[in-house]
Amino acid sequence: MNKGSKVLKLISLEKERQNDTLMLIPSENYTYPEVRFAVGSVLMHKYSEGYPFKRYYQGNKYVDEIETYAIDLAKKVFNTPHANVQPYSGSPANAAVYFGLLKEKDTIMGLSLSSGGHLTHGHPKITFSGKYFNSIQYGVDDNGFIDYENLSKLAKKYKPKLIVAGLTSYPRILDWSKFSLVAESVGAILLADISHIAGLVAGGEHPSPVKYAHVITTTTHKTLRGPRGAIIMVTQKGLDKDPNMGVKVDRAVFPGFQGGPHNNQTAGIAIALENALKPDFKRYARQTVKNAKFLGIELAKYGFSLVTEGTDNHLLLIDLRNKNTTGKLLATALEEAGIIVNYNAVPKDPNPPMNPSGIRIGTPAVTVRKMQMGEMKLIAKFINKSVENLNNKNVLKQVAREVKDLCNKFPVDLN
């Protein structure tokens, strides 16, 4: 190994940064050492275009076994009859579903970005999903909760072919049964994007959409603690609606969108799914939600305005307008204090996307460190101290030292 490599030195510095700071971005997490080993293994050397036992390249004996095992695990963890573990990430997974099951200019409906949805859920004009399909966006009510009544009205008016139920910054339980009733009322396909909450679903801390949705997509990092990757699953309800739905999705992934799968990624996904079946994982999911709820309570004591006044899942969305700052200013100050969050739009945000009114905070990674309620109380204190001293570099540096001390008491295995 070339220890003098600039890249290796930068990786070492990044490792140090992750060790010494609080990772509070809800979409980030620490994966398992075994997953990192798999992703860095010799599997990255192999091309495997096609599917198990139907490849366009020779030499895939063991790759076929790994992918078949990953598929079986995905079906077992999420209780679905069909799974595809090849998508490179969440956005290509959603794109493959649209490509496989829709026609160009079909109408889709998704939660708007400012209400907590994702760009791939039909964000207009600048995304493929908003550009190549007729996108109708539903939103939240004045209290920040999904407006299911308005969702139903929009669906009956625009007759979408597909409705997306999913979140990136929505802190509450998604009511799959209500989404299902709306989809059935207009004959739409219901796509449940559980990328953020997959680990909570697997751990029993969020209701599963499997009885209600036709298709489920998820990334495999975030709360699931796997590598950066994705899974597409077709439910029994999906197969009842269209017996070829699984085939259509598979063809959309390959050859529709991708060439050879990343076999090292597939192996990492399999390891994460193995762990998701263990009792420890259920405890992890439970503690992740407990930590998020308690952190929200502590932040509220300092006067922070929580969208929906709390959370049911792993994340908090904080409206900073009563703190006379913006999300970008606070996120930048918090980074100096060793606390890593992301600035984020809030419902009906008057500010632009690059300088929105909120921040988004999540507990998956600090829960991996075994932090609990006492540490959430400290984290809330650190955040409040930072917002009160946005321009005081000395105070922010002091907070960073305290954060580092806390992290050292709760080490994470990054080897």
Image (cartoon, rainbow, N blue to C red):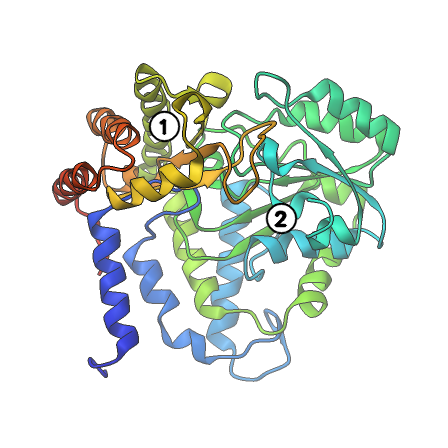
Q: Which mark is residue 233?
A: 2
The residue sitting at the front extreme is 391
Is 345 on the left-hand or right-hand side of 328? right
Residue 23 in view of the camera: no
Nearer to me, 118 or 37: 118
Residues under labels 1 and 2: Cα distance? 28 Å
Q: What amino acid is found at the position of numbered circle 1 in the picture?
A: Ala
Answer left or right for 390 relative to 311: left
Of the pair 388 and 277, the residue shown nearer to us: 388
Q: How many marks?
A: 2
Question: Is 156 or 236 nearer to us in this picture?
Answer: 156
Q: Residues within 10 Å of mark 2 (few under 14, many from 20)?
A: many
Res 370 → quadrant: top left
Mark nearest the camera among 1 and 2 is: 1
Instruction: Locate the C terminus by quadrant.
Output: bottom left
Vertical comparison of 179 with 356: above or below: above
> Going 46% across and 17% down the picture, which residue do you hit?
309
The answer to whether residue 100 is seen in the rendering is yes
- Residue 396 point in image, percent of width and height: 21, 39
Q: Residue at x 67, y 24 (%)?
A: 177
Q: Earlier in the sequence, mark 1 or mark 2?
A: 2
Answer yes or no: do the residues labelled 1 and 2 have beta carbons within 8 Å?
no
In the picture, residue 375 is in which quadrant? top left
x and y, in percent, of residue 308 in the image:
51, 19
Q: What residue do we see at 60% from left, 43% from top? A: 118
Give the secondary structure at mark 1: helix
Q: Residues within 10 Å of mark 1 (few under 14, many from 20)?
A: many
Q: Which residue is mark 1?
A: 292
Helix, strand or loop status at disc 2 = strand
On-image quarter of the N terminus: bottom left
Residue 410 in the image: x percent, y percent? Answer: 16, 41
